[in-house]
Structures are given as C-alpha cells and as structure tokens.
Image: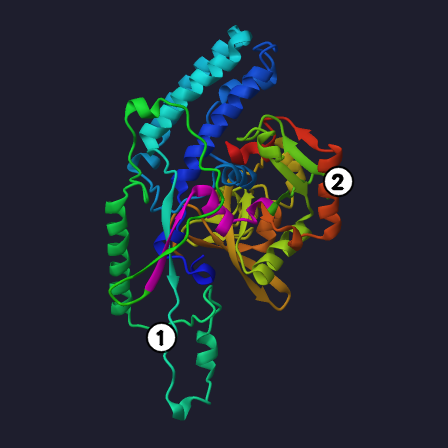
Amino acid sequence: MVSEHGVDKADASLSNNWLYFYDQLERCAFWLECVRATADRPLTDESVRYLLEKPVADGGTFSMAVNIVAKYGLVPNKAYPDRPTTQLTSQLKVRMKRVMHLGAHQIRANPAQAEATLQTTMERVYRLLSITLGTPPSEFVCATEIKKEKEKRSKTNSNKASKADVADAVQEEEPSAVPSPAVSSSETEREREGTAAIKEELRQEDPSLYGTGQGSSLSEAAALPALPATSLSPSAPSPSKDRMGTEYAFTKHTPLSYAAKYASDIPDYICVCQDPRHQEGQVLTVDFLGNVSQTEGGRDTRTLYLVVSADTYIDCTSRTLNERREPVWFGCEFRSSNGYSKSHGLLSLDTYADEAIGCVTEKELGKLERVLIGESQCSHAMLITGERVGDRGVEAFRVENSHGERGVANGFLDCSVPWLREFGFMAAFHPSMLPSHLVTLYKEALQTGNVVVLPPWDPMGALAL
C-alpha cells in the first residue's frame, strides 16, 4: 500500500479492532442460527453439547477474515484504533457468553419466537461490543502522496542517466509526476508533522472523518448495527500540501471502498490444509464453524479447505514468496514440546534431544497417528515472510509470530522445512500459485457439493476457537 499506492504509513496500518468487532458480531449471529437449527435435538446430542460449551471464541481462520472484509470492508488503524479494553477481552467474553446462553435457552424453549429472540440477543451483543471496543466509523479520510516532478539536471549531466536515476523512477497516478529527491531524516520528520497538522485541521472541520474510536452512549449502542455504506466509490481526492511542500491527496472512503481499492483480490485466495487422513484434492469443511451466513451476498462463506500434500504445501509457499513477493498466512501446531524454542527463535525437530532422554519423537508417532489419536491439532497462525536456500534447495523459512516483538529476533523465528511438514496444517494461497488440477478439483467440489463435512470437534477446526 505504501510503495505501490503512496498511502501514508499511518493510514496503511489496518485496524485489528475493526475485524475483531465485526467478527464477534457475526459469530454470535451465526452461533444463534446454529442453535436454532438444532433446537429439535436433545441436550444430550453431542453436537448440541459442543455448541453450548463454546458460544464465544476469538480465534479464526483466513476464510473467516475474508468474510468480514467482503461484508464490512477495512479501515486504517487510525480511524478505529485499539483501546485498552481491546487487549483485555476476557471479561467481555464472560459477559457475552452469558448473553448467548440466555438466547440459546429462549430459542430452544420457544422455537416459534426464535427470530424475535435472535434480534433481542444481537442488540445486547452490539451494545456490549460498542461500549467495550468503540463504535466503528462509517467513513474516514485516507492520505496518499502526490509525487512531485523531479528537478531537471544541469545541461552537462542531462544525457548521463545513472542507475540511481532509474532506481528513483516510479510509476505515478498523474502522468507527469516524478518522485521528489531524497530528503534527510529531519526533513522527513517535518513532512510527517505537516501531514499530521493537515489531518488535524480536517478533523476539526468534520470530526467524523477519522473517528474517535470512543464508545457511543448507551442508547446509541443499544441499536442494531447499521450495515456499512454500500458505495464502493471513494470521494474525489482533495489535494493539500504540508510545510515541506509535499503534496497529499485526502480521499474520503467508506470501509467497503477502502477494501475494494487496496484488498480487492483477497476473496480469490484458497485455503489449503495438510490433513493426512484425506487424499490430495478433496475439499473439507467443519460443521457449525463460521462467522457469516452462507447466503450472504451469494458468496459461499463456509470455512473450506483444499487438501494438499506436504510437497505441494512447501512448494506453493516458496513460489508465493518469490513470484508474488508476498508473505504466506499459515496455521500450525505451536508449543514447546514439538520443537519451539522462544529463547533461540527456533521451530525445528532438532531443537531438543528428545530421543536421547527417552521421549517420543516424530519418527515413532507420525503426523497421521498424532491427528487420529488427538495429539496434534491446528492451534496457532503466523506469517511466513522469507526463506533460506542452501545447496539442496529451501532449508528453512522466516516466520513472523503474532505475539509481538518478543524473543531473540524481535518476534521472528527460524522454521525448518521438516518442522513445517510435521506441524504445518493450513495456509492461504492465490490460485495462480497452486497446481491447476487442484484448483479445478476445488471448483468442481463446490459446484457439485462434494465437500467432506467434519464434526465440530475435529482438529481442523481448532484454530477458530
């Protein structure tokens, strides 16, 4: 976003609070629909018992994030920042769980009034979320730099284009625009200050543009959430200059127009999984796992996984890093007993001398056996951001953990390929990175309905809990 579109860095950082708010809102509605669908089953039914035990969860999968972006869009973190309560959601979950249990009891006791019960319950959920996380903005301003025309070189150097000149050249939205010369760090800081001052002036003129991230009054929060603006077209940009003369265009966006401009290809990605219980090419889903209704906008919003082999999983990861130049979201089993060392920043089968002290190793209990017996499940998600290549090919991947800049390498880990084969489960790839025959099998399965439905407690659904 920064390098390709010129988005100001402060506006390129996306709001986690936004995704969490609407994920929790949609999950609660989805869960209540599942309760209504199973209202005729006894409380001793295994699926019913599982549903009632887990009414609120804050994990998630790539597909679930895509559902939220497709329905509600995205906003910069500056428009809807985290609040202190965003990091301390345990009390929110306790209270939401009680609200959901009340709704479930009323739906099962009086199925004829299920629709009214769902409406009342969702009003309470929205109120809790708004007070805790703040009311989400409906529109905001995004700043993008307008590249200034570069000063012409002196006549003596006019015909001597250097490599630096070529490196400086970038493609612009304006036909005649060329990037401005490099500036010192102090000048860059003054530009940021100038940009911040301009944004503050806009905020004073119209406080709704950036949003405050503050909670609404109780009467406002009690109302059901209005759907975000449906327009996908941003307003015309309004150019302004900071004190250094750098020109910025301030464009008013809705969350949907922002997502359409900067994340339009996200819904195209396919989630894959390494599940040794199933053949490569099969498509899986987990019963009662999701966050957005399957009929929403005509999209198939189920949590779907295309089964791939470990070789395909590794190959597509490497190709995505090198050909698409983008990181790879992946889900894995993540704990110290399977080779994770926080102090050394390692994910490796050789981290600990388990065999020497008599512990069970992966040679004795393989991935298939661990999944079948309940030893392994997908429980954590991270990003693969790079790879290390040796004489025999890819040896390890550079992984960015989601726990912040903790550990010996500022939150990054060295993940060996053998470890990823054993403990990697899921990943999201663009269809162009997958073998074409697997993409064809995936599309055919969706068209014919040939999708394997796993039970709600299956290890492949653990990441969403």
**SS at mark 2?**
helix
Q: Determine whether, in the image, residue 367 is placed left or right of residue 101.
A: right
Checking the image for residue 367, the label placed there is: none
Comparing 118 with 137, the one in front is 137
Q: Alpha carbon of mark 2 to alpha carbon of mark 1: how far?
A: 53 Å
Q: Where does the magenta region start and end?
A: 247-267
Q: Amino acid at mark 2?
A: Glu
Q: Determine whether, in the image, residue 15 is placed left or right of residue 68.
A: left
- Residue 302 visible in the displayed image: no
Checking the image for residue 444, the label placed there is: 2
Closer to the chain start, of discs 2 and 1, is 1
Q: Position of residue 77 (x, y in %)?
A: 36, 46
* Extreme residue toward the bottom, this view: 156
Q: Position of residue 455 (x, y in %)?
A: 63, 26
Location of residue 371 with respect to 175 vertically, above or below: above
Q: What residue sits right under mark 1 in the picture?
A: 181
- Residue 74 visible in the displayed image: yes
Is residue 251 rendered magenta in the image? yes
Q: Amino acid at mark 1?
A: Pro
Residue found 53% across the figure and 9% down from its top: 108
Q: Position of residue 365 (x, y in %)?
A: 64, 40
Location of residue 417 with respect to 119 vertically, above or below: below
Q: Position of residue 188 (x, y in %)?
A: 29, 66
* Mark 2–mark 1 CB contact (< 8 Å): no
The quarter of the picture where residue 240 lies is: bottom left
